Each structure stands twice: as C-alpha cells, then as structure tokens.
Image (cartoon, rainbow, N blue to C red):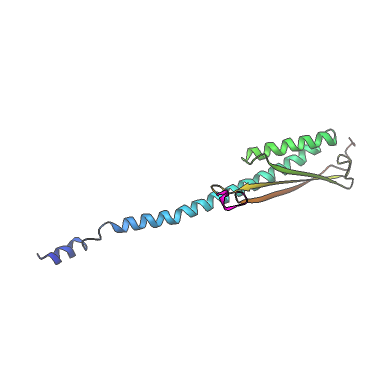
C-alpha cells in the first residue's frame, strides 16, 4: 500500500482529535455567559420573591398590632425576617400608609398599604466600572383592609 492510500484509510492523517478540542472550547465560550445570565436572573427573582413576601407579612403584622407604633415595629421585623428567608440583605426601605385616615391606621374601615423596596446586586459584577456594582431595584406593594366591624384600637 502506498502512503497516500494508508492516510485515506486511516482517516486523513494530521487532523485527528482536533474536533473534540474545538467543540470543548466552543461549549465553554458559550456556556460561561449563559450560566452567568441564569445566575443573575435567579438572584433578581429571589429578590422579587423576597420583597413580595416581606410586604405581605409586614402588612399583616401591622394589622394585628395593638397600636400604630407597635405596628410599625412589628412590620419592620416581619419584613426583615421575610427578606432574610430569601437571602436578601438587610438594607431595605419600608413605607407604610393608610387611607382614609393617614394618622390612624388601626381604625375601622382603613386600608393599610405597605411598600417594600430593595436593591439586588448582580453576582460577580465588578464595581471598578464606576458607581458601585450594577444592581436591580425591586419593590412590592401589599394592601390589607383593617375591617369595618373591628373595634378601634
């Protein structure tokens, strides 16, 4: 057998095994950004779940309190616990408002509105680009009616 014929039978000679290396590098180059995007989306979703649970539990805690001052303290504690359950930082804003009487939330017929806001930092994002690490702002609003037939506290 001649040399040319041996190379044709053996599969082409000098290119053996290079397709595996090319596919491996291509997979790494495509998978690393995809995994980063998925991790970022999951972190933002975790923050969204956290503020949703925090606003709901803070509004309920406020409605069950004995006074407005106690309600604000219990609402902040409930929001902190709900955010910690989702692994969100302690840094959050809590706004509580009431209608129709803004000064007395625990009066019959009032509606307690709680808004929780926080920032979710993107993972592995460098703050060297200026202005701190990139982040998303997430917020949630929950309303709880106090009830028309409840004794005023």
Bounds of the magenta span?
126-132
Q: Nearer the viewer, residue 88 or 50?
A: 88
Report x, y in % for residue 123.
55, 47
Horizontal arrangement in the rendering, residue 8 relative to residue 134 (left or right): left
Residue at 73 percent across and 44 percent down: it is 93
Q: Is residue 84 above or below residue 47?
A: above
Q: Is residue 9 magenta?
A: no
Q: Quadrant of the N terminus?
A: bottom left
Query: Residue 17 appears at what percent x and percent y?
Result: 27, 56
**Does the stretch in magenta take in 128?**
yes
Q: Please name the residue shown 41% across and 53% down the image.
A: 28
Q: Position of residue 9 (x, y in %)?
A: 17, 63
Q: Quadrant of the C terminus?
A: top right
Q: Nearer the viewer, residue 132 or 96?
A: 132
Nearest to the observer: residue 76 or residue 144: 76
Asked if one can make out residue 79 in the rendered structure from this viewpoint, the answer is yes
Q: Is residue 77 left or right of residue 40?
A: right
| Number of numbered discs | 0
In this rendering, position of residue 64 left or right of residue 137: right
Q: Is residue 64 visible?
A: no
Q: Would you place residue 60 above or below residue 132 in this image?
A: above
Measured as percent of width and height from the top left, residue 7 is found at 17, 63
User: Relative to 109, is 131 on the left or the right?
Assistant: left
Q: Residue at x 67, y 50 (%)?
A: 138
């Amino acid at each position: 057998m001649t040399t040319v014929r041996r190379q044709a039978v053996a599969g082409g000679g000098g290119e053996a095994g290079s397709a595996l290396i090319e596919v491996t590098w291509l997979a790494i180059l495509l998978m690393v950004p995809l995994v980063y995007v998925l991790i970022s989306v999951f972190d933002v979703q975790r923050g969204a779940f956290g503020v949703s649970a925090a606003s709901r539990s803070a509004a309920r805690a406020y409605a069950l309190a004995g006074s407005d001052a106690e309600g604000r303290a219990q609402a902040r504690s409930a929001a902190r616990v709900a955010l910690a359950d989702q692994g969100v930082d302690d840094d959050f804003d809590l706004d509580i408002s009431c209608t129709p009487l803004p000064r007395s939330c625990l009066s019959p017929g009032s509606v307690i509105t709680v808004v929780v806001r926080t920032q979710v930092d993107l993972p592995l994002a460098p703050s060297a680009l200026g202005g701190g690490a990139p982040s998303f702002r997430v917020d949630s609003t929950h309303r709880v009616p106090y009830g028309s037939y409840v004794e005023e506290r």
